[in-house]
Image: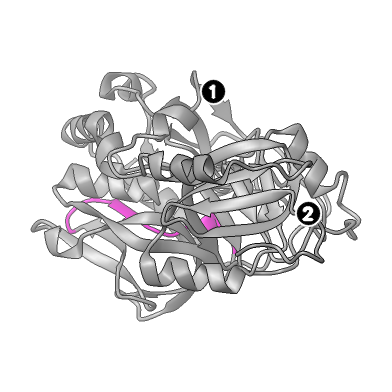
């Protein structure tokens, strides 16, 4: 899609592995990056999306055009730095207009080494992703507009893809730590837990801060362990519950070291287990199910999910490119939630134990409180066992 001769010289270029080129205006960091290209349909939360560790190895196309209009602030990060490789938007980010803003989006991206491209026909790009699957892409930003297009397309084609790729080990914490900060509440903001709670070990496959806050708000004292923690390291903390976090990459690859740990914990303890996103997939693999790569995944804050136990429909936030194969669920493990978009699996639980998980993000509040009951269910399960 070459630029018109009367248009300003493009300063960014998005190249797909099939040779398709999109020109636009670069912002944020300069340079080049390669990743899988996905789209997200959320109308808010671009800062949370860019800092969600589940987006490692991906460039995010935002279908909502007003990206950057509320700036960024120190409180909305889901982890210390942006994890998504880059962002694609319809309109160039504008001067922020929000009382919480402390910095412009483009300056924030530049300071943190992430590339953005504006002026893209994101509807056309989204249709291509839906029809052809999530493509491999290369994104380049050069203020002078100098691009080696053949090299850029070759770079996109050289990206290995997410299948078989363990990314949880790259985004996990390096050592264990305690978490006691609760969810934001007016007018105090973020406050810390003061009273003792249920002892929970959270395995960090790429944990979002709001998940840990939700656990703390539900009454849990949370100890976070790295993704590679062994069953012995988990049990040494004498937890009353085990939480498996969200994260990026191919669940089968992460499962090489995560599944043996989960199975040992299940064998040696009757504690409740709760998983979200990649943690849901890890639990499913540990129980004997399989996961498969999706065509373009689910990314957004408007996904309807049906609770098969109650008949209730929840509006959920999702971010995943792999899914649990419902047909592979073993005896004694039932499907509890399904996507009303495509019927894919969104939740499981064991029949005779308090062990359950969901594919979506109950902490993200798209409903806004449709799914918070899951944290309370985990807490109540701990109390029953205790």
Regarding residue 270, the answer to whether it shows in the image is yes
Q: Judge from the rendering whether residue 168 lies leftward or rightward of residue 49; answer left or right.
A: left
Question: Considering the image in quadrants, where does the C terminus appear?
Answer: top left
- Asked whether 14 or 347 is in front, the reply is 14
Which residue is outermost to the bottom? 311
State the SS at label 1.
strand
Please tell me whether residue 270 is drawn above or below residue 306 in the rendered image: above
Please provide percent x and percent y for residue 361: 48, 57
Mark 2, mark 1: which one is toward the viewer? 2
- Does the magenta segment cover residue 364? yes
- Tell me the element at label 2: loop
Q: Which mark is residue 9?
A: 2
Q: Which residue is mark 1?
A: 177
- Residue 355 x/y as whole percent: 27, 50
Query: Residue 228: which numbered mark, if any?
Result: none
Q: Residue furthest front?
A: 5
User: Which residue is pictured at 36% across the width and 50% down the height?
Assistant: 381
Q: Which of the colour schemes (rainbow, by chain, secondary structure, one colour) is used?
A: one colour
Q: Is residue 23 left or right of residue 332?
A: right
Which segment is the magenta one?
A: 351-365
């Amino acid at each position: 899609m070459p630029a018109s001769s009367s248009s300003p010289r493009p300063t960014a270029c998005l190249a797909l592995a099939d040779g398709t080129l999109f020109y636009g205006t670069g912002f944020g960091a300069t340079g080049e990056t390669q990743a899988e290209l996905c789209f997200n349909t959320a109308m808010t939360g671009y800062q949370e999306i860019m800092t969600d560790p589940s987006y490692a190895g991906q460039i995010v196309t935002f279908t909502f055009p007003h990206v950057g209009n509320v700036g960024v602030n120190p409180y909305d990060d889901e982890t210390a730095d942006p994890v998504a490789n880059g962002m694609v938007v319809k309109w160039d980010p504008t001067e922020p207009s929000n009382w919480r803003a402390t910095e412009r989006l483009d300056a924030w991206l530049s300071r943190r080494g992430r590339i953005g491209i504006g002026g893209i026909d994101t509807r056309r790009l989204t249709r291509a992703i839906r029809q052809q699957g999530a493509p491999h892409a290369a994104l380049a930003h050069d203020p002078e507009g100098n691009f080696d297009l053949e090299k850029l397309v070759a770079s996109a084609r050289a990206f290995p893809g997410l299948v078989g790729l363990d990314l949880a080990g790259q985004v996990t914490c390096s050592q264990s730590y305690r978490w006691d900060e609760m969810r934001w509440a007016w007018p105090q903001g973020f406050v810390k837990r003061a009273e003792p709670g249920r002892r929970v070990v959270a395995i960090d496959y790429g944990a979002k801060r709001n998940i840990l806050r939700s656990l703390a708000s539900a009454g849990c004292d949370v100890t976070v362990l790295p993704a590679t923690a062994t069953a012995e390291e988990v049990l040494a903390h004498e937890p009353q519950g085990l939480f498996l976090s969200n994260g990026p990459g191919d669940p089968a690859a992460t499962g090489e070291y995560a599944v043996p740990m989960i199975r040992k914990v299940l064998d040696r303890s009757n504690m409740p287990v709760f998983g979200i996103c990649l943690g849901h997939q890890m639990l499913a693999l540990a129980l004997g199910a399989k996961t498969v790569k999706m065509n373009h995944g689910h990314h957004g804050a408007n996904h309807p999910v049906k609770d098969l136990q109650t008949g209730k429909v929840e509006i959920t936030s999702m971010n995943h490119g792999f899914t649990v194969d419902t047909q592979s669920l073993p005896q004694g493990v039932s499907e509890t939630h399904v996507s009303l978009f495509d019927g894919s699996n969104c939740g499981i639980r064991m029949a005779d134990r308090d062990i359950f998980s969901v594919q979506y993000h109950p902490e993200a509040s798209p409903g806004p409180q449709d799914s918070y009951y899951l944290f309370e269910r985990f807490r109540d399960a701990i109390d029953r066992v205790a």
